[in-house]
Image (tube, rainbow, N blue to C red):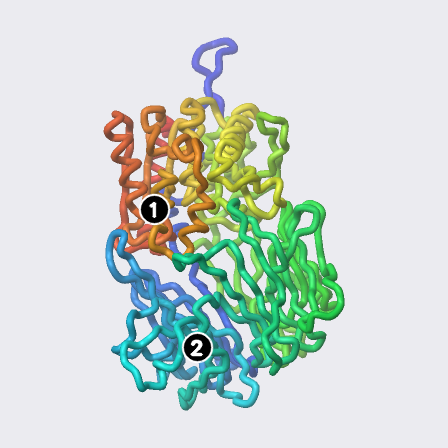
Amino acid sequence: MRRVSLVAGSAMALCLCAPALAAPADDLAAKFGARESIRSVSISPAGDKAVAVMALPAGGEVAMVIDFATGSLKPVMQAGAHNDGLNDCLFVTDSRIVCKAWLVQGSGRQLDRYTKLFTVKPDGSDVRTLSDPVSSSTYYTSGYGGGLVDLNAPHDPNAVLMQTWFAPETTTGTIRSAHKEGLAVEEVDLDSMKRQVVEPPRSTAGGYMTDGMGHVRIMQLTRQTVDGYASNTDVYMAKPTPDGPWRPFSTVYNLPTGLSQGFIPVAVDPQANFAYGFDSKNGFTAVFKKPLDGTGEVTEVASNPTADIDDLITIGRRDRVVGVSFATQRRTEVYFDQGLSNLRTALGNALPNSPLISFKDASTDENKLLLYAGSDTDPGSIYVFNKQTNQLSPLLPTRPELAGITMGKMTSVTYTAADGTKIPAYLTLPPGSDGKNLPAIVMPHGGPASRDEWGFDWLVQFFAVRGFAVLQPEFRGSSGFGDAWFQKNGFQSWRKAIGDVDDAGKWMLAQGIAAPGKLAIFGWSYGGYAALQSQVLDPDLYKAVIAVAPVTDLDMVRAESDNAYNHLIVDAFIGHGPHVDEGSPARHADRFKAPVLIFHGRDDTTVGIAESETMADHLTKAGKSVQLVTFEGLDHQLDSGSARSELLSKSDQFLRTSLGLK
């Protein structure tokens, strides 16, 4: 940071100006706010084409088929903006693609989200609705349009297995009226659209799992209370053979904190006839395998004494399990498949500046692979790898707008909380900075059952490029660090979680990273809650507060689930007692000293807009400085390039004004 002499002698002053920028703030906001261009990508069974769901600049998505031989791109399906969109598309056969679309209807607290599956040919012709047709005589319309559970069917190469929700009908004497209400599995031929039920509807079924060869092998059932709400107990049933009867397999208890106890099956190995699943070992999540026929012991597959194993790595059209992954300072993959392990090492050597490499999809013979590679300073690209020719070819960049912009490096650090606990965090400094006397931001993550990871983050990098140091604390209440670290979750144990967040800010000041009086906090969802609640705990620490789609009153969160199937689970997660009032920032607006800027989408079905409106109203009545910016037609993610650009631009201006920056 440049030092300016005010008078002769030793008197010095700091110029708290952002480093020189390569582009104006609004231009950078537009580039960083642009939506990630690749939403999903899938390779054809033959490995000669791919389908990518790509974000459109003005909103919405388009599914593009890419021919590897010619390099041509063909649009095959498109969704509009704001109230509808495409989630993902999969090449199911060489002649059929299946896409999942969504739609939001209603307004205010009466918002409903619907999904629907479509199938289309790779040339964009013959679009058909794959979701189960709804009769006009059904009692109600389910918002669930179904989901693929297996790309393979036992006897029909053109068919898939999909979950479907059946609603009861008001008429009698029809085929549908013979079915009970609930989640079922159907086999659907993608050409003829012929459908047949392979697992009948069950009202308590929460999901089905197959062996990747077209056989349903595991079923999740959720016990219900007498009032029809979901209880805290899930029972898993399994078939010992593909055509065998259902037998009890495991029972999982969902604790009020959000943790669970019991073996949770997540994948099936059809050759060895066992299920992979997650369970606890010494307070950390580990991977085990359990025989489907009930014989033999449950045996450990992988564990880590300091981190939760949180993901299985699968590959191919049958979702073959090839490894596990977990996150410490960086995400680590452990491969069971030696060939893939060697390939992963070779790819790392070929892409030394993009160490985050993950396999996204594979052709039927697994000779053609789609993979992602990126880093903390590189948003990443999708590549095609040909095992036979040993050729790696770039396919699509994920954020082309950011090409040529120098990013800030993300490093792992630890700081000491007030009780002496060492808290891990990620620190990102402005490019070229010496890391001292900077305007700084503490950025707690959402969740609260989540965590940050080393890698590219558009929010972090925007502020770093704009001259801010950004610290992302893995406060107690974060996931991935074991049960003890999780505490009673970030709401019931809010004092511990928010205390850790505040200690992150104090550490930045003590280390000289943050200049005195130039420390702010920015959070999204639970992170927004943490940003607001930090003012309740220590109103003098942060000099500016930005909250995006924040929780502001714990009883309001509870109330938003009043008529939901999982109401009792949400109720237990929030809990009851003094922490509800003490941990609701909207009830303590009188304690706020820093100016507050809030953003919220009006169609947010995760955290209702009323939470932010209530917070802004209470702050206004208390005579505090607050701005509320709302976005019509947008949900919790504010998935719009223009909205995100506005968020970044207004946040940057707000911080510079509030912190007295030039």
Seen in the image, is 110 located left or right of residue 76? Answer: left
Q: How many marks?
A: 2
Residue 413 place in picture, x, y as percent: 61, 37
* Upstream in sequence: badge 2 or badge 1: 2
- Dividing the picture into quarters, in which one does residue 239 lie? bottom right
- Residue 190 lies, with reference to residue 256, above or below; the image says below
Q: In this view, does 257 lie above or below 616?
A: below
Q: Which amino acid does label 1 sit on?
A: Ala
Quarter that holds the C terminus? top left
- Residue visible at 36% across and 27% down? 594
Query: Considering the numbered disc 1 on the image, is that residue within a helix, a strand or a loop?
Result: helix
Mark 2–mark 1 contact, CB under 8 Å? no
Residue 218 as seen in the image, left or right of residue 293: left
Q: Is residue 129 visible?
A: yes
Instruction: Identify the residue position indicated by label 2 in the image.
Output: 98
- Residue 90 drawn at (x, y percent): 48, 74
Disc 1 target residue: 559
Q: In the figure, is residue 498 to the left or right of 293?
A: left
* Other-residue count near label 2 (Cα within 10 Å), few / some / many at <14 / 14–19 / ≥20: many
Asked whether 399 or 134 is in front, the reply is 134
- Residue drawn at point x = 58 percent, y = 29 percent: 417
